Amino acid sequence: MGGKKKLSLKQMDRMQVKKDEEEKEKKKKEKTAAPTKEKKSSVIPPNPKSEKVVGELKKMNVLTPYAVASRFNIRISAAKDFLEELEKNGAIQLVSGNHDIKIYKAAD
């Protein structure tokens, strides 16, 4: 039976003007704010035979696809292939893993 009272035309007009001003200020702030940095990851992994790359990997305690992907800014699928290639070359050893994730360490 009750409910909210219906606003007059003047009140609705004031609310609309106020709302428009807030949206303009919000758009100005968005334009002046620094643009967000998007993370771009490449598909091409680094060269597994490079001494610099192997040296970087030896500094890491544990080598997982996520750790390698975040370090070299590549996709996780590319990091998995990269780690398998390094294992074939003998630069790293498989410590543990299953079909989802494999954990490696640098070869001594």
Image (cartoon, rainbow, N blue to C red):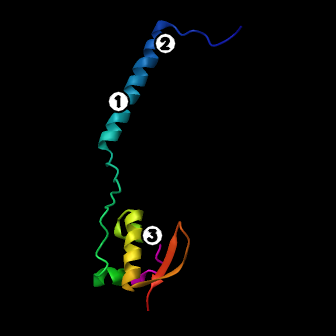
> Disc 3, disc 2: CB below 8 Å?
no
Say which of marks 1 and 3 sits in front.
3
Q: Residue at x 30, y 72 (%)?
A: 46
Which mark is on residue 11? 2
Q: In the rendered structure, which segment of residues is drawn in magenta?
A: 58-66
Instruction: Please tell me in which quadrant of the rendered image residue 18 appears.
Output: top left
Q: Earlier in the sequence, mark 1 or mark 3?
A: 1
Label for residue 100?
none
**CA separation, marks 1 and 2?**
20 Å
**Amino acid type at image mark 3:** Pro
Quarter containing the N terminus: top right
Q: Position of residue 34 (x, y in %)?
A: 32, 49
How many numbered circles does the render carry?
3
Mark 1 neighbour class, 10 Å CA radius: few under 14, some 14 to 19, many 20 or more: few
Q: Residue furthest right?
A: 1
Circle 3 residues within 10 Å: few <14, some 14–19, many ≥20: many
Q: Residue at x 56, y 71 (%)?
A: 98
Q: Amino acid at mark 1?
A: Lys
Q: Position of residue 45 (x, y in %)?
A: 32, 69
Q: Secondary structure at mark 1?
A: helix
83 up-or-down from 31: above or below: below
The residue under label 2 is which amino acid type?
Gln
Where's residue 41, x and y in %? 34, 60
Contact between marks 1 and 3 (CB within 8 A): the answer is no
What residue is disc 1 on?
24
Q: Which residue is mark 3?
A: 65
Location of residue 81 with respect to 52 vertically, above or below:
above
Quarter residue 89 falls in? bottom left
State which mark lies toward you, 1 or 2.
1
* Residue 95 to residue 34: above or below: below
Q: Are marks 1 and 2 in contact (CB under 8 Å)?
A: no
Position of the C terminus, as image quadrant, is: bottom left
